[in-house]
Image: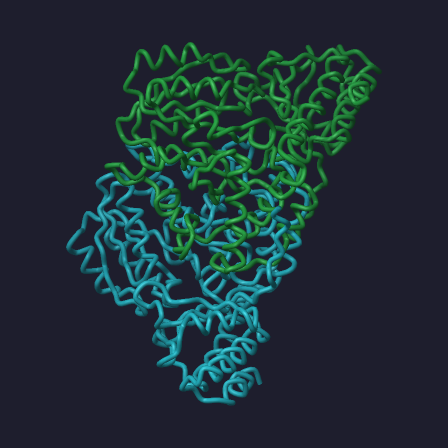
Chain colours: A cyan, B green
């Protein structure tokens, strides 16, 4: 007979999910109520309002999709891409490739702009792609590449798209709540994120926002959106405007309690303070890692504070280290993906996991583990280097 | 400043979500771990095993989709319907209509078999539809219509589809865990359910199962599945078989803790006992309602024990009653949908909500509320009639 599951108490410093605050876990366990309950409708309105603040947008269509970030991505592409549409897709990691898949599955033509993994999207290549394909209707790129820890310049990329009259679809799964995201200021037309990164909720919900222009594009479609679940026209009947709510699907009530609480916590701390906290602990982690002799994959200018991709020291067995961290320290860090598998670790400092305790734990655990494997690192310097940044 | 949300403690006797057991809520609040954590992978295997038992199937592709029941429906149709495919869709309520939408959005042709709302699907009409369209590739129907409280004869309908060499897609959102569902015995090829009905979890997850024939159909597609998130070929890389798990999307960790606990509870009680419990409390509720003079929409032979659609007494203001129940008793019952709006209430007895306390509360609250509105009902007889069934 299978019995109740009691998970180990990990420290989550991978690429997400990140540590969830006890406040958010407690919110998630509150009694379930109906998805059309007046109390729930009021909470939905508060979530919308807080998401607008977080995305820095007045977009009316700013809602949490009832499924993980991958479904948020799909919600953007399935609504905005029509068969035959040209979409310029920037790929500098795993998730640009997933965008390409999305475009193609919905009958669009993906014009690829390739950059090396670990580098940001090159705006000049994007401009050249628009010059070669001035009829491209959409530019799609990843703001913060979860597979590499790179930040691309969303503001500049959106400006280029606007020059050519194209809409923009932006992946902010790992950026939202960790670094600045300015939907209205940068002119983003469709954006999606996830709850399990810098918002420190359990995974399962994807906040999205569509600009008025994006909504107009959806309404002007000549073909039906090839999804019922993600059709924004229908979802808006439940989440949209004021007045009567039409039943669309049953919202994931308790997961939305969690998101609500996480957003309240961001508001309490203040979003600028949240960003500053990510910078501060990133600086400490970086000082410690560099003192150990571990180097970063990404140039400093494009480095995400919340996701640190570092090179695995020569001769070190990737999986053995991660297994030891998990077994001896209950600490999860992330493996590399794709071409970077076995070459890098991805160390997350996201949301509630972005704190001094975790920085110190990670440095000590990594140093002890690497020392035990006779890895070529400097010993006894990491902790002091990190602590020095906090003074 | 928006503050933490504290929901009222409702009793959920609508069409779902239903009351969630404190054990399941507690499970949901356990610490989040990674979606590739060895401990989580082990829990996933246990969920698969328990879902197979619950569906009564050996289907390898038996997994929880990471989104609500509507996405489970879409997962079945988007994988199995190719452009031009004829699909016979039975409609005897809201959800048959949603199936039609799904077929059409994925380029299929929906051959509709219509039955009156409140009656089951007529097998002879289904046979006639196959005779008129012997090239139909799929039969799709709703086992337990959530909008009306009707049970259709899934075994008989599947047998007809097999005669004509068609696959079957079955909506078991409201049936699974409330009445018998026998995937292998009845020859169901694709089935989806929801966690928020008779499994008494918070909404957000949709258990599905695909037969070997259905999987073969997906693999033999000549067009790409027009969804990345729901593509079963990809999802199987994460959930399927043994050995290495490929990352597909980030699973909703804590929602799966909840599902795991709910399935453990079903196993502890025993599925036959669970069905019997639904029958028992349905009988009590029915005795009480009938003693009050309230009548059922659905014939006894096709009535679902877990969802009781009853006619609103003449002259009674539907919304006023439901509002009074919510305000005075924290009790939620369901409104009618579509043509039945304002004509029926839908009283759920699902999962953890299916207990004597709820039956008695509902009868008393309804009687008191209707009495206060001078509704034409019999007073003072409902409780005794219900209690008599328990003796």
Front in this rendered view, residue A57 or A98: A98
Q: Residue B186: percent from the left, percent from the top?
A: 47, 25
Question: Quick check: A313 left or right of A358?
Answer: left
Residue at x 62%, y 44% (from the top left corner): B264
Q: Quadrant of the C terminus of chain B?
A: top right
Residue at x 45%, y 86% (from the top left corner): A291
Asked if residue A55 is positioned above or below residue A325 in the image, the reply reads above
Asked if residue B283 is positioned above or below residue B352 in the image, the reply reads above
Residue at x 76%, y 31% (from the top left corner): B329
Residue A235 visible, this orientation:
no
> Which residue is outermost to the left?
A132
Q: Residue B386: percent from the left, percent from the top?
A: 78, 20
Residue at x 44%, y 60% (from the top left corner): A174
Q: Residue A311: percent from the left, percent from the top?
A: 37, 76
Q: Residue A368: percent from the left, percent from the top?
A: 52, 82
Q: Quadrant of residue B199?
A: top right
Q: Quadrant of the N terminus of chain B?
A: bottom right
Question: Quick check: A299 left or right of B333?
Answer: left
Question: Quick check: B189 left or right of B286?
Answer: left
Residue A362 visible, this orientation:
yes
Front in this rendered view, residue A283 or B91: B91
């Amino acid at each position: 007979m299978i019995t109740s599951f009691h998970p180990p108490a990990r420290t989550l410093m991978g690429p997400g999910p990140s540590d969830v605050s006890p406040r958010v876990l407690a919110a998630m366990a509150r009694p379930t109520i109906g998805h059309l309950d007046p109390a729930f409708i009021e909470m939905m309105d508060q979530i919308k309002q807080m998401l607008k603040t977080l995305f820095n947008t007045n977009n009316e269509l700013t809602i949490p999709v009832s499924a993980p970030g991958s479904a948020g991505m799909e919600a953007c592409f399935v609504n905005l891409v029509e068969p035959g549409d040209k979409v310029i897709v920037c790929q500098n990691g795993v998730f640009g490739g997933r965008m390409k898949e999305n475009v193609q599955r919905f009958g669009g033509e993906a014009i690829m702009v390739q950059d090396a993994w670990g580098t940001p999207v090159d705006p000049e290549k994007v401009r050249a792609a628009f010059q070669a394909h001035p009829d491209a209707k959409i530019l799609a790129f990843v703001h913060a590449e979860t597979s590499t820890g790179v930040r691309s310049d969303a503001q500049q990329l959106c400006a280029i798209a606007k020059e050519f009259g194209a809409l923009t679809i932006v992946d902010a799964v790992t950026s939202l709540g960790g670094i600045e995201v300015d939907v209205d200021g940068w002119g983003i037309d469709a954006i999606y994120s996830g709850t399990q990164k810098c918002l420190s909720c359990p995974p399962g919900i994807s906040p999205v926002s569509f600009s008025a222009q994006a909504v107009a594009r959806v309404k002007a479609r000549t073909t039906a959106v090839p999804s019922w679940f993600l059709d924004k026209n229908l979802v808006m009947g439940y989440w949209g405007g004021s007045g009567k709510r039409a039943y669309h699907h049953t919202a994931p009530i308790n997961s939305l309690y969690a998101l609500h609480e996480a957003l309240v916590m961001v508001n309490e701390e203040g979003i600028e303070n949240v960003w500053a906290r990510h910078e501060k602990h990133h600086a400490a982690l970086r000082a410690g890692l560099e003192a150990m002799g571990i180097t970063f994959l990404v140039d400093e200018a494009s480095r995400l504070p919340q996701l640190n991709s570092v090179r695995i020291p020569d001769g070190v067995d990737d999986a053995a280290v991660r297994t030891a961290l998990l077994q001896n320290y209950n600490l999860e860090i992330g493996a590399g993906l794709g071409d970077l598998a076995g070459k890098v670790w991805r160390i997350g400092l996201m949301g509630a996991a972005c704190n001094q305790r975790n920085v110190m734990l990670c440095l000590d655990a990594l140093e002890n583990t690497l020392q035990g494997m006779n890895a070529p690192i400097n010993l006894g310097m990491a902790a002091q280097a990190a602590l020095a940044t906090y003074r």
